[in-house]
Each structure stands twice: as structure tokens, then as C-alpha cells.
Image (tube, grey):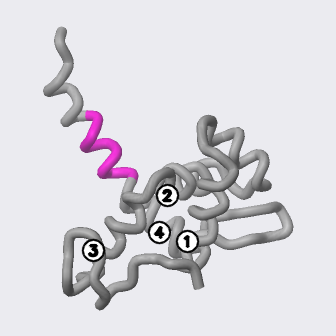
Amino acid sequence: MADIPQPGSPVRGSRSGVPIMAVFDLLGRNWAMGVLWTLSKGGPCTFRVLQDRCETISPSVLNARLKELRAAGLVERSDQGYRATPLGLELYGLLVPLGDWSKRWATRFDPT
């Protein structure tokens, strides 16, 4: 299994590894949330297409994130390439309201 944050084990921000901190540790890794977001919103795609959709991600980082997200049960391989699992889609659904909130928060920094 890829080296992923595990609930109950020390993770960034929590010595006890509370589940929410384990999730934040996983999603806080470079490009992890972007990969999950892209697969959840855009549907299944091959490695090359996913790399193009993520724009600036390197092949080595994409490969590492896919291994971690697969080990966490959020992404899987299919006949069409990589796709979000039902658990990954559920997490995406929980992140959408956070994305909406972040847009409202960002207006605090609007110079106009």
C-alpha cells in the first residue's frame, strides 16, 4: 500500500491521527485535491488526459498522487482509465460547499 495518512496514526497536525486530520493530510499533498476534483468533475480519463487536465502536474507527482488516492480508496482504475470511486465522489460532494464558501471568503480580499 502507498504511504498514505492513516486514521489512528500520527499525521500532519495530529499526533493521535484523528480521521479529519488524516484526510486533511492526504488532501493537502501537492495536487491530491486537484486530481480528485478533476476526476470527480470530469469523469474517467487516462493518465495522459488527466495530466493534460491538471495542466502543470509532472508525471511523477501524478503517479504518486494516483497511488495514494487509490490506496485511500478514493480513486480506481477502470476500462476508461482512472476514475473517482463512490467514496471519492462522496468526498467531492462534501468539498463543493467548501469551494462555494471559499469564493465568498475571497471577496474579503477583493481590492475593488
Judged by its main secondary structure, the magenta piece is: helix
Which residue is located at x 85 percent, y 68 percent?
A: 79
Q: Residue at x 64, y 45 (%)?
A: 58
Q: CA distance from mark 2 to mark 3?
A: 16 Å
- Amino acid on which the number 1 mark rests in the picture: Glu
Describe residue 49's horizontal placement relative to residue 91 as left or right: right
User: Can you give x and y, in whole percent of width and height, for residue 55 in the image?
Assistant: 63, 36
The residue carrying mark 4 is 90
> Does the magenta portion include 98?
yes
Per the rendering, the mark at residue 20 is 3
Q: Whole-percent x and y of residue 25?
A: 34, 67
**Closer to the camera: disc 4 or disc 2?**
2
Q: How many angstroms separate mark 4 from mark 1 (CA)?
A: 17 Å
Front in this rendered view, residue 31 or 109: 31
Which quadrant would the N terminus be assigned to in this image? Answer: bottom right
SS for dot 1: helix
- Where is residue 11 shown, x and y percent of the image? 29, 76
The amino acid type found where label 3 is placed reads Ile
Three-letter code, disc 2: Ala
- At mark 4, the secondary structure is helix
